[in-house]
Image: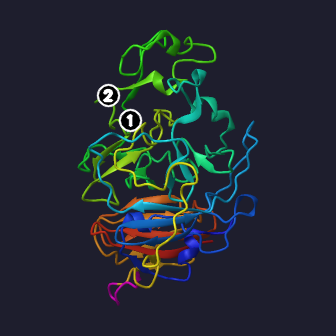
Amino acid sequence: MRPNLLALFLAIPLLTLSQDAEITSWIINPGGETGYNGNLTNVQQVAYTDADVYVRCTCIPGYDIGPWAGNPNTPANQDFCFRITRGPVENTGTLVNTPLGHIGVWRNGVSIFNAKDGISYNNQGIWNRDAYIFEGSSFDACLGHPAPNGEYHHHVSPNCLYAHTDDEHHSDLIGFAFDGYPVYGAFAYTNPDGTGGLSRMRSSYQLRTITQRTTRPDGSALQPNQYGPAIGGQYPLGAFLEDYAFVAGSGDLDEHNGRTGVTPEYPEGTYAYFVTLTENLLPAYPYVIGPTYRGTVPAGNTGPQSGHFTIPGNATTFPSSTNLKEVGAAPADLLVFPVPTDGLLTIANLPVEGAGIDIMDATGRSVMRSQVSTSWAQLDLAALPAGSYLLRADGKDGQVLVSKVMVR
């Protein structure tokens, strides 16, 4: 696979990205990069207005996917164009359930699905089967699989998209829900104000202590004809989403599987969803976004035939000359040397102290991270495979600098 996000910047030695995360976080195909079955990969175009961001994508990732044991479906180009609001608003009225099909989009243009597999016990919609339990055997190594319409998607953590086992850094921003709030990996600042080190964000949904499926998660009784199957055998506890109940305060996240707090991209704080994993870093219910959205969901992204917006004529395409600008003249220029390097890389003239530095591979995944407290740093890249990488330095003031790096 040829570079995608990296290739976008290879012709540009040093840039400042001055836009917001909902614009700058996408893995953009520079043109012609292909993946599964020769389909174009990742995001084809990002455009924005004051109100919305438009993300045009194929739903085919840049990393290798497949096979899918027992799944006869084949991934295909979905030709999506999603619209993400730039001003998410908490829903203070009737909460909106996350529906079947796409409920958000990962930063590589692949669909986020909820926890359901689309089948309920006796087709009553009361006891809904957990896709991780009933379809997990058909997930590929990246924990994704194609739907009957060819839509490749993840119900759980998209492990090939980011360093999901990295517990030494705040997890990457890896997508956006259709209510406009960002989605992060499992590790975040322990305290919402950004203090206390890092912790794995724990779901507040707990398996119920039931021996029969005769009540709803809130404890209300069901009619006998609504009872679920006996617990055990084909239907162990946890086979259905209703085997879980939300227990406030038992984890770190709310009923939507998110919280409000500081993140690297939002130093002033934001509401965000988090992928949830067990202590063994296996998917944990509700996996990504909870049974309901936290925010209001604009029409057009969910439901049949959804995700096919037309980018308005007044939208600005990202990146463009208006939102990428060269860093100021020397001596303030960032210095990165030697390029290429056999291992040790020196980065000097960082614009602010306390910068976070990422080395990103061809898929846009961070393969090395460092936090520095001075205006310069040295990184040992000897362990990385030879090839092209992107160095990204994030300052506390919101400034982002990027530079190409070659390892030989």
Residue drawn where x is 62% and y is 69% of the image: 3
Q: Which mark is residue 250?
A: 2
Judge the density around disc 2: few (<14), some (14-19), many (≥20) Cα neighbours within 10 Å: few
Q: Nearer the viewer, residue 259 or 13?
A: 259
Q: To which residue does mark 1 refer? A: 202
Label 1 secondary element: loop
The structure residue drawn at horizontal position 59% and vertical position 25%, both measured from the top left corner, is 123
Magenta part of the chain:
324-332
Element under disc 2: loop
Rendered image coloring scheme: rainbow
Q: Kindly report the distance in space between the C-alpha atoms of the residues bearing marks 2 and 1.
A: 8 Å
**Towards the viewer: 103 or 261:** 103
Q: On the rendered image, what quadrant is the C terminus found in?
A: bottom right
Amino acid type assigned to the residue bearing label 1 in the image: Arg
Q: Which part of the image, by quadrant, shows the N terminus?
A: bottom right
| Residue located 44% across and 48% down the image | 185
- The amino acid at mark 2 is Ser
**Residue 356 shown in magenta:** no
Q: Position of residue 230 (x, y in %)?
A: 56, 11
Whether the residues at callouts 2 and 1 have beta carbons within 8 Å, the answer is yes
Work out whether 379 lies above or below 253: below
Q: Residues within 10 Å of mark 1 (few under 14, many from 20)?
A: many
Q: In x, y percent, where is residue 239?
A: 55, 23
